Image: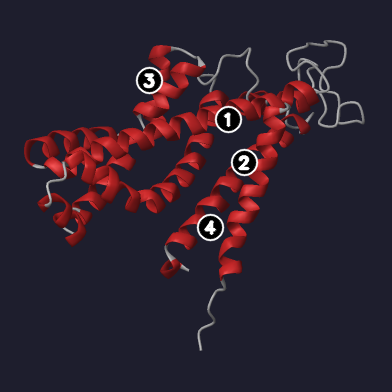
Amino acid sequence: MEKKTSPKQKNIKIVIGLSALTFIFLLAILAPFIRPYNPMEINLSRLLEAPSLKHPFGLDENGIDIFSQILYGARVSLLVSFVVVFINLLLGLILGSVSAWFGSFTDQVLMRLVDMVSAFPRFLLALALLAMMGSSVFNLILALCLSGWAGFARLVRAEVLHLKTEEYVLSALSSGASAIRVLIRHIWPNLLGLLLVQAAFSLVAVVIAEAGLSFLGLGVPPEIPSWGRLLSSGRQVLAEAPHVSLFPGLALFSLVLSFQLCGDGLRDFFDPAST
């Protein structure tokens, strides 16, 4: 007989993911109070110092404490990822619903726009936009939003096309309910689980994209600590001081793994057949 997965086993991924994510959140929020040193204070007399009791993650090529930079880098990664995914989800929800509900010419126009955005790899499109706009947190968020909403829109459209033919939706329409009321009260609540799963996996993609763009020098400005920038500077001294890349890489891995576990756990919770 096939062994069934207990609810406790299904939820363990969410518990582990949320626990790790909460810990990272607390470190990011409390960064100004728990940082041992100024994350931008240069000390040219102690370049590339190895990890020690005073500097648990060591110093970088400018003599700056890496642990303090990682704490502030977490703030950047979390801010960018959640803002981008929230905007992408909202845009995808509205445009996908409009496309599926009204159909015809509206559907054709919006879906061709989705096809145009989807035709470009997300990272390369964001890279091109940032190369034109310049490096800043606002431009980074804007570039990742412009390149990432299409997936949500396509997903929402497919689900709304299915749900709009359900009996409870047709009943609401026949009773005189407006399209907006039907969408908000009857259709969108049924998309909650699907959108939460998609959002969790999108957070993974955005975190990696933000780090990759900062690695290439097109993410956040140099004066703002970033995990991607730390990884970029560390690759130049990898043989001499591997700690410069090691600890930012572990921080990035931990955040990505947390989001991935949350996404897997939510998918198992909302779709038991997938386990």
Residue projecting furthest to the front: 175
**Eye-nearest disc, 4 or 1:** 4
Q: Which mark is drawn over residue 129?
A: 3
Question: What residue sits right under mark 2 in the picture?
Answer: 255
Label 1 Cα crowd, 10 Å radius (few <14 / some 14-19 / many 20+): many
| Image location (x, y in percent) of residue 30 | 73, 27
| Image location (x, y in percent) of residue 164 | 18, 53
Is mark 2 in CB contact (under 8 Å) with mark 3? Answer: no
Q: Which mark is drawn over residue 77?
A: 1
Cα separation between marks 2 and 1: 9 Å
Q: Earlier in the sequence, mark 4 or mark 2?
A: 2
Instruction: Look at label 2 and name its amino acid.
Output: Leu
What kind of element bears circle 2? helix
Q: Which mark is drawn over residue 265?
A: 4
Eyeballing the image, is 241 above or below 107? above
| Image location (x, y in percent) of residue 52 | 90, 30
Is mark 4 in CB contact (under 8 Å) with mark 1? Answer: no
**Eye-nearest disc, 3 or 4:** 4
Cα separation between marks 3 and 4: 34 Å
Eyeballing the image, is 136 above or below 231? above
Label 4 Cα crowd, 10 Å radius (few <14 / some 14-19 / many 20+): many
The answer to whether residue 148 is visible is no
Cα separation between marks 4 and 1: 22 Å
Is mark 1 in CB contact (under 8 Å) with mark 3? Answer: no
What kind of element bears circle 3? helix
Eyeballing the image, is 101 above or below 6? above
